[in-house]
Image (cartoon, grey):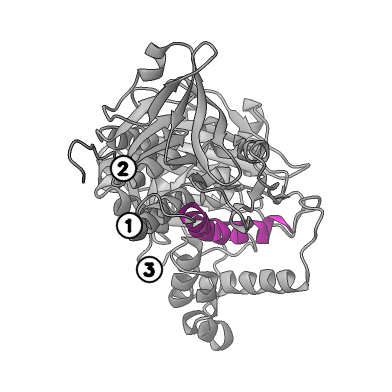
Amino acid sequence: MAEGSVSRRPTAVVIGASATGLLAAAALADFADVTVVERDRLPDGPEPRRGVPQARHAHLVWSGGVKAFDDLLPGLTGEIVAHGGRLVHIMADMVSRAPNEVWFRRFTSTHHRNLVCSRDLLDSVLRNRVLADERITLRQETTALRLEGDATAVTGVRIRTATDADADAGTGTGTGADAGAGAGAGERTLRADLVVDASGRGSRAPQWLTELGAPSITEREVNAGVAYATRLYRAPEAARSIDFPLVNVQANPAKAPGRGGIVLPIEGNRWIVTLAGTRGGEPTDDPDAFVDFALDLDDPVIGELVKGLEPLGDIVTTRATANRRRYYERVTHWPDGFLVLGDAIAGYNPVYGHGLTVAAQCALAVRDTLGATGLGQPGLARRIQRAAGRPVAAAWDLAVGQDALYPGATDTRPNGVERLLARFVDKAVETGARNPRAMAALLDVMSLERPATRLFSPDMLIPMLIGPRRPHLQGPPLTDAERKAAMP
């Protein structure tokens, strides 16, 4: 280095303090000073915020996401558990009916452990952990307006804040991206070596890229028309002293409308109860109809568990549940210095619970690719975008393979190969319900730990073809102690 010169650490801007954005910031911090731009003012603790309207519904993190969490931020899962979260064995701690109306046995031999807690708690612990890093700066109440640069390279992002005081409020003491003054009250440009869009389903990246002269992005939507209704309940007294299982009745796409629900025990001696239904069978926010809807599912177990319990607050509904994907990884001439991650690439029907796992695996793709090359290499952003597309594609295939079967879900009906694969997956589920080796293979895929080819391994094919064939369960496998504890 020449005498008197000063080495400059690379800079990155992350748009959105979502779980995706925070995980991406953590992945980037070893390589750059990171500024997180967030349009909301974030809560101080485990409280709801406007930017995550789906937070009131049931959430879980599959074991593939749990591993990614702790790979990115060692000990993160333990921190969440210490604050009341829970690692549950799947399937030992889960009572679940598959879409083909088969009840899973509660095998204890699989290694899969999913993280269960409220979304508010998860986000709070994640925020505190990530924003404590001095290399990361948070700019709250700040809106990203557009990208700076051209079709070949993004050089920054134009932002707007009410005042500079608002812009700099928040957690983090890092230097962040270089802020250049510009015209317009509260507007400025943040220059960056890398800009990451983690703004979720409402991402404006396609429009921004078009404005820079980049080609339009191919998109696809598969919308089963699912609506969600969620209510929080106080857990029965006796259930608080045991690790009460998750209880899940999945909708059957062979029946229209498809309806299902889940009981999710969470911190604070509470149960989140989320009910779902497709077009013509949607749950409502009518408190007098909530339990009746649960009792009217193909199996009434959820209604039987919650009737008579004390509700905590009103019913919250959501209808924006379509699977929507943008194929950024297919763009041949991708601009350097720009990435799109998480729900901004693809949003899924929440019933499959893959959003948080994909977010963490996308962040791992960022970290691992940068670890091999560092920032500033030509074509780097395109390589990372393609790497991030792999967990997105895995979750997408699992979601649309079921949802595309609902009437009106898509203009493009499944082709012969897709229908054949759907029938094979149904057979794999049926086999997994009765055989622990097959169940482990199925969970490897569902948890996004292994590719779908795992379903064609001997662990699945041998039990599928030759057995042993244990009889299917005739009802939900709750133990006598659990049934007794669930009584209010």
The residue where tag 2 is placed is 29
Disc 2 secondary structure class: loop
C-alpha separation, residue under disc 2 versus residue under disc 1: 11 Å
Q: Are marks 1 and 3 in contact (CB under 8 Å)?
A: no
Disc 3 secondary structure class: loop
Residue plotted at (54% across, 55% down): 392
C-alpha separation, residue under disc 2 versus residue under disc 3: 35 Å
Q: Are marks 2 and 3 in contact (CB under 8 Å)?
A: no
Figure disc tally: 3
Disc ID at residue 311: none
Outermost residue toward the front? Answer: 3
Outermost residue toward the left? Answer: 3
N-term mark: 1 or 3: 3
Q: Are marks 2 and 1 in contact (CB under 8 Å)?
A: no
C-alpha separation, residue under disc 1 versus residue under disc 3: 32 Å
Kindly report the secondary structure that dominates the magenta region of the rendered protein. helix
Question: Residue 212's x, y, as percent?
Answer: 63, 38
- In the image, residue 381 lies in the stretch drawn in magenta: yes
Question: Residue 28's x, y, as percent?
Answer: 35, 45
Q: Amino acid at mark 2?
A: Ala
Q: The magenta stretch spans which residues? A: 380-404
**Which quadrant would residue 22 be assigned to in this image?**
top left
